[in-house]
Image (tube, helix red, strand yellow):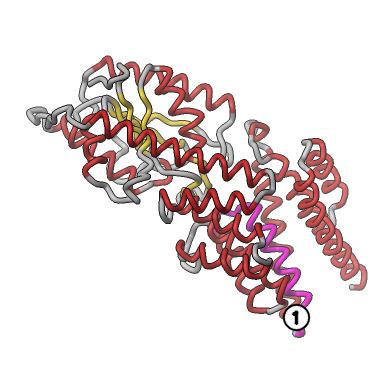
């Protein structure tokens, strides 16, 4: 089947935005997978690339989705993070079409259900992103796999492999070209909105970013990544005032049920809003809520963002405690959290591929502040130098220095208590 522009169609089935793989505890940027690996491979192989981002479907498989799964010349299904929609759509494709289906996943994730007998293309994330070398390798190898799948004609569906007399259902060409055009246009509109929002956020135009994420949320309601970023941009915009924006941000993220969530991003952003509410109102309950969310986020993934903020909140609460035992508990909890972060990051830095990570500056910034708070000033200074040598933006330096001031005070207080014992 060829389209009016004489290209075959590849339908890409995968999650959207940043998703947490609960088996490994890591967050994967699936948009980076699409942009750096899948789309270049598909287009280099000469196909038209349509992503199943469910812009017009709001998470519900409907007639158009079934038709795309049946009629597309090729389907690439990325089942990383165990995305239930992607796995279901893969099953529908296997039932409808005997061949030209490629299954792929990030290499640290597990295969779900009865998929371990299916040939699976694997790639590797470094943190949230994909290193340039790995993206190039994976895209080249995926292109070769696409070309081989289209040329082979052999069944790759387990349904048609085990039921060789089964015949593929057929439909007419009517309206299919129009459906593909509409889905491609919706895909571009959503991608453009998110790209615009992220650019505005990087430029510190948080009000503009919030408006763009709001428009994206209208196109794709309640997608976790979009809701998270909408809440983040809303509270950072501080409109009409700081406290009102924080309350609105908490209201927005409530769509993800943060109190029950195991998503570290949802927990971390919610924790940040409660932390800032406490700083603005000095109401102890807000700080307790911040600790609750940061702690759960850190328990799930052991990530340095939730962990460092958790330790800072423990310090803040410890300083407010009237009961000396409670104060001691908070101080020790903060120290143990920082020791865990340092151990995790030291292990990560020993990985020879870690230099390709896009978040290296923040890894060194976090190491510096944790080590300052733990009283290891020499090692902390080395990581601080590496952070500053990475050419951070002005706002990144300001964020680091805010944490550094707190960490130095914490480290000095710890040394003072040690000397008095």
Quadrant containing the N terminus is top left
**Image quadrant occupied by the C terminus:** bottom right
**Front in this rendered view, residue 270 or 340:** 270
Res. 382 visible in picture: yes
Classify mark 1: residues with Cα within 10 Å, few (<14), some (14-19) or many (20+).
few
Residue 180: x percent and y percent?
30, 32
Find residue 69 and report its horizontal and vertical position in percent. Answer: 25, 35
Residue at x 34%, y 16% (from the top left corner) = 147
> Along the horizontal axis of the image, is 232 left or right of 321?
left
Lateral position of residue 182 relative to residue 191, left or right: left
Q: Quadrant of residue 129?
A: top right
- Identified at 92% across, 68% down, the residue is 419
Q: Which residue is mark 1?
A: 321
Residue extending farthest to the top is 151
Which residue is depicted at the point 51% across and 62% down? 253
In the structure shown, which secondary structural element does the residue marked by tag 1 occupy? loop
Q: Which residue is at the far bottom? A: 323
Out of 95 and 60, give the one closest to the viewer: 60
Front-most of residues 378 and 355: 355
Image quarter for residue 302? bottom right
* Nearer to the camera, 163 or 389: 389
Residues shaded magenta:
300-322
Is 316 magenta? The answer is yes
Q: Residue at x 83, y 46 (%)?
A: 379
Q: Position of residue 163 (x, y in %)?
A: 11, 32
Q: Position of residue 257 (x, y in %)?
A: 46, 65
On the question of residue 298 being in view, the answer is: no
Q: How many marks?
A: 1
Magenta-span inclusion, residue 264: no
């Amino acid at each position: 089947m060829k389209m009016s522009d004489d290209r075959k169609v590849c339908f890409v089935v995968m999650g959207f935005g940043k998703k947490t793989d609960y088996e490994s505890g890591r967050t994967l940027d699936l948009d980076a997978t699409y942009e750096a690996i899948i789309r270049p491979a598909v287009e280099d192989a000469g196909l038209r690339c349509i992503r199943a981002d469910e812009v017009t479907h709001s998470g519900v498989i409907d007639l158009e989705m079934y038709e795309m799964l049946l009629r597309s010349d090729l389907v690439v299904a990325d089942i990383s993070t165990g995305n239930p929609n992607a796995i279901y759509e893969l099953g529908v494709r296997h039932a409808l079409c005997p061949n030209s289906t490629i299954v792929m996943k990030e290499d640290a994730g597990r295969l779900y259900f009865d998929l371990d007998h299916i040939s699976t293309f694997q790639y590797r994330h470094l943190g949230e992103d994909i290193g340039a070398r790995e993206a190039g390798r994976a895209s080249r190898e995926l292109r070769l796999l696409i070309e081989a799948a289209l040329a082979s004609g052999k069944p790759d569906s387990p349904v048609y492999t085990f039921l060789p007399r089964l015949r593929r259902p057929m439909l007419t060409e009517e309206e299919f070209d129009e459906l593909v055009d509409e889905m491609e246009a919706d895909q571009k509109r959503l991608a453009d909105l998110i790209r615009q929002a992220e650019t505005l956020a990087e430029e510190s135009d948080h009000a503009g970013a919030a408006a763009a994420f709001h428009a994206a949320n209208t196109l794709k309601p309640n997608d976790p990544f979009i809701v998270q970023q909408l809440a983040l941009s809303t509270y950072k915009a501080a409109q009409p005032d700081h406290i009102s924006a924080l309350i609105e941000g908490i209201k927005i993220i409530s769509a993800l049920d943060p109190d029950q969530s195991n998503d570290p991003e949802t927990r971390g952003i919610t924790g940040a809003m409660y932390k800032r509410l406490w700083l603005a109102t000095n109401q102890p309950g807000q700080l307790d809520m911040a600790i609750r969310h940061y702690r759960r986020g850190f328990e799930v993934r052991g990530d340095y963002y939730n962990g460092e903020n958790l330790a800072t909140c423990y310090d803040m609460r410890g300083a407010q405690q009237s009961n000396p035992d409670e104060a001691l508990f908070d101080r020790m909890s903060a120290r143990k959290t920082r020791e865990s972060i340092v151990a995790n990051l030291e292990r990560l830095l020993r990985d020879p591929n870690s230099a390709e990570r896009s978040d290296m500056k923040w890894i060194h910034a976090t190491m510096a502040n944790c080590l300052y708070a733990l009283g290891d000033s020499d090692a902390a200074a080395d990581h601080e130098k590496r952070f500053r040598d990475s050419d951070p933006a002005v706002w990144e330096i300001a964020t680091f220095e805010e944490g550094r001031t707190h960490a130095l005070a914490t480290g000095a207080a710890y040394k003072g208590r040690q000397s008095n014992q």
